[in-house]
Image (spheres, rainbow, N blue to C red):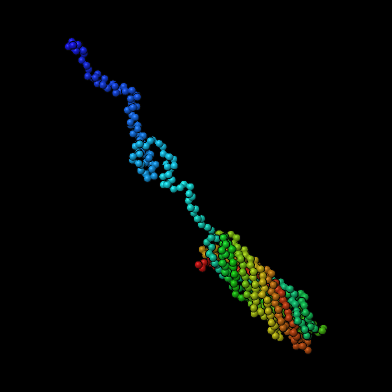
């Protein structure tokens, strides 16, 4: 026994360490998976607990069920609920921004006025002058009816004038209503043709009457025109605004009187003029000078304006007839197409009352 122990070589301490460490390094794979299984179960349980906390509507998981919950994927509806509750809806359209109306028409003031002067140039013509109510001694020299070759015209005139306008509440704000105002001006009637150049009653029973030609002067009256138009601006910009217009007009006359020296030598005849309606055709231009000051050039033509005048109780001297100092001719009637052009220029401004 002692000899046996003596003959066994002494063991190397390092070999003992190696032998003790060898079993750990030589552990079979099955043993390693078995050793790692507890760690994997803990990891899966932690992941399941985190998923339960995330899917809870209160943001807190049940403590008792968290370690035991199986590793399941959360339901899609539950997972999407908090996202839809916290995030704003993606398909709700943003409120549409209001688009302001731009341009001169949208900011155009409601009222405007233009002050200046007007030149009235009639394109006049007339029918032949007619005599009526001829009786007594006058019937020996003249007869009822027209005087061949006779006529009358109306002279031009000028007057201060104003245009008052209001912008109509249309979508484009290009329509306006205008009223033309002017001071009364004097209209003079002129004789033409045989009425001015020849005697009304040259002979009576073959005897010269001594009545001379009337000459150009007939009569005059104070005219008061009323003109209303609807205008439309063709374009709108910061410099010019051309426009067209149309509307009615009426010419009123007052203080009419005969001014011919032959017709007024015996007495002052009575003269009257009926109101004369017409149709206004208008065109013009507004030029922008400053922010609210405009210059205007406006042209109107009044068509179909027929002025009818009557002169009653006409008496004329008959120096060639010794038995008659004067004779009453009767009534003279004139129908004159006035049809004036009205050319107006001035300055004005736009404004609002409220």
Q: Is 146 located above or below residue 11 in the figure? A: below
For this rendering, which residue is in front, 16 or 80? Answer: 80
Question: Residue at (68%, 71%) from the top-left corner?
Answer: 305
Q: Is residue 284 visible?
A: no
Query: Number of labelled discs?
Result: 0
For this rendering, which residue is in front, 151 or 113? Answer: 113
For this rendering, which residue is in front, 239 or 16? Answer: 16
For the N terminus, the quadrant is top left
Tell me where residue 201 sits by quadrant.
bottom right
Question: Residue at (43%, 45%) from the top-left corner?
Answer: 84
Tell me where residue 237 appears, x and y as whole percent: 55, 59
Tell me where residue 306 appears, x and y as whole percent: 69, 72
Question: Residue at (33%, 29%) from the top-left corner?
Answer: 36
Question: Residue at (24%, 18%) from the top-left corner?
Answer: 15
Q: Is residue 230 left or right of residue 147?
A: left
Q: Is residue 232 visible?
A: yes
Q: Is 9 located above or below residue 148 in the figure? A: above
Q: Is 347 located above or below residue 69 in the figure? A: below
Q: Is residue 178 left or right of residue 268?
A: left
Tell me where residue 126 sits by quadrant.
bottom right
Tell me where residue 155 appears, x and y as whole percent: 67, 74
Q: Is residue 326 left or right of residue 184?
A: right
Q: Is residue 81 left or right of residue 177?
A: left
Q: Residue furthest left?
A: 2
């Amino acid at each position: 026994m002692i000899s046996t122990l003596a003959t066994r070589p002494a063991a190397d301490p390092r070999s003992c360490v190696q032998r003790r460490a060898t079993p750990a390094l030589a552990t079979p794979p099955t043993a390693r998976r078995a050793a790692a299984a507890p760690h994997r179960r803990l990891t899966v349980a932690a992941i399941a607990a985190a998923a339960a906390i995330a899917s809870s509507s209160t943001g807190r998981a049940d403590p008792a069920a968290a370690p035991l919950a199986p590793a399941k994927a959360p339901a899609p509806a539950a997972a999407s609920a908090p996202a839809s509750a916290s995030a704003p809806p993606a398909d709700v359209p943003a409120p549409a921004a209001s688009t302001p109306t731009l341009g001169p028409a949208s900011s155009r003031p409601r009222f405007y006025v233009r002050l200046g002067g007007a030149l009235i140039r009639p394109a006049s013509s007339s029918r032949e002058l007619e005599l009526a109510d001829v009786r007594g001694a006058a019937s020996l020299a003249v007869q009822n009816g027209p005087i061949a070759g006779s006529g009358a015209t109306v002279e031009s005139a000028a007057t201060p004038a104003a245009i008052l306008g209001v912008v109509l509440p249309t979508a484009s704000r290009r329509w306006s209503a205008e009223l033309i105002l002017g001071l009364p001006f004097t209209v003079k009637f002129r004789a033409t043709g045989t009425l001015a150049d020849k005697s009304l009653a040259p002979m009576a029973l073959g005897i010269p009457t001594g009545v001379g030609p009337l000459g150009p002067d007939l009569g005059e009256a104070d005219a008061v025109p009323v003109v209303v138009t609807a205008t439309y601006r063709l374009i709108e910009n910061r410099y010019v605004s051309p426009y067209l217009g149309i509307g009615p007009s009426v010419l009123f006359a007052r203080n009419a009187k005969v001014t011919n020296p032959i017709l007024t030598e015996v007495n002052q005849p009575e003269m009257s003029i009926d109101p004369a309606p017409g149709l206004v055709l208008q065109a013009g231009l507004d030029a922008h000078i400053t922010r609210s000051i405009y210059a205007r050039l406006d042209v109107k033509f009044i068509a179909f304006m027929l002025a009818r005048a009557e002169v009653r109780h006409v008496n004329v001297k008959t120096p060639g007839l010794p038995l008659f100092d004067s004779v009453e001719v009767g009534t003279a009637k004139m129908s004159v197409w006035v049809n004036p052009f009205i050319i107006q220029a001035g300055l004005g401004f736009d404004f609002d009352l409220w």
